Image (cartoon, rainbow, N blue to C red):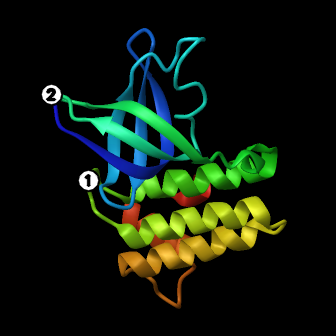
Amino acid sequence: MASYKTAAVTLKTAPFAESDKMVTLFSREFGKIRVLAKGARRVPSRFGGRVETFTYADYFIAKGRSLDIVSQCQIIETFQKLRDNEKLTAGLYVLKLVNSGTAEGQHHPELFDLLVETLFRMKNEKTYKRAVLDFEAAFARLEGIYDVRMHPRDSLSLHIERDLRAW
């Protein structure tokens, strides 16, 4: 069975089967990928909190028939400080924007670098709102939809065909 290693940020997780998790990752090399973390929902899981939302980690992934499977995971950063009320909402917004604005398997290294930089800024700065606004503008520029006459959030809303103000 072929396998690969990548550094990635967990965008979201969802229950899968009885004790597994479907994990959506965003990596520099492979873009957005969906992988299965077997046994991640069990209490004594070898993954523990390693595949939770916001986690930036090195993943060792085995190619499966229909889904790739996480076999090992080494945490780089958990972004624990983003888990308070206000920063949590802003951080989840950024992750949801990346998840909605990218296609699976779309190679986008500049966006990955921007995402990681933004999460570190939000973690370390008290004014996390500025980091979110900068992220929106930079994301719109990367996608080629930035318009100086529009707020970046409005440009991105048109791009992903969802009203971001409702988020």
Q: Residue at x 34, y 35 (%)?
A: 35
- Identify residue for label 2: 65
Q: Is 51 displayed left or right of 60 in the figure?
A: right
Could you tell me if residue 81 is visible in this image?
A: yes
Where residue 143 sits in the image (x, y, percent)? 37, 75
| First in residue order: circle 1 vs circle 2 | 2
Which image quadrant is residue 111 in?
bottom left
Pair 1/2: label in front: 2
- In the rendered structure, which amino acid carries the disc numbered 2? Arg
- In the rendered structure, which amino acid carries the disc numbered 1? Gly
Q: Is 51 displayed left or right of 84 in the figure?
A: left
* Identity of the residue furthest to the bottom in this view: 148
Answer above or below: position of 91 versus 10: below
Which image quadrant is residue 131 in?
bottom right
Where residue 78 sits in the image (x, y, percent)? 65, 45
Q: Is 138 displayed left or right of 16 in the figure?
A: right
Q: Residue at x 44, y 81 (%)?
A: 141
Classify mark 1: residues with Cα within 10 Å, few (<14), some (14-19) or many (20+): some
Label 2 residue SS: loop
Label 1 residue SS: loop
The Cα–Cα distance between marks 1 and 2, rounded to whole angstroms, is 16 Å
Q: Is 75 displayed left or right of 16 in the figure?
A: right
Count of numbered badges drawn on the protein: 2
Q: Residue at x 38, y 61 (%)?
A: 28
Could you tell me if residue 161 is visible in this image?
A: no
Answer above or below: position of 122 versus 12: below
Q: Residue at x 55, y 62 (%)?
A: 116
- Identify residue for label 1: 105
Which image quadrant is residue 85 in?
top right
* Residue closer to the observer: 24 or 47: 47
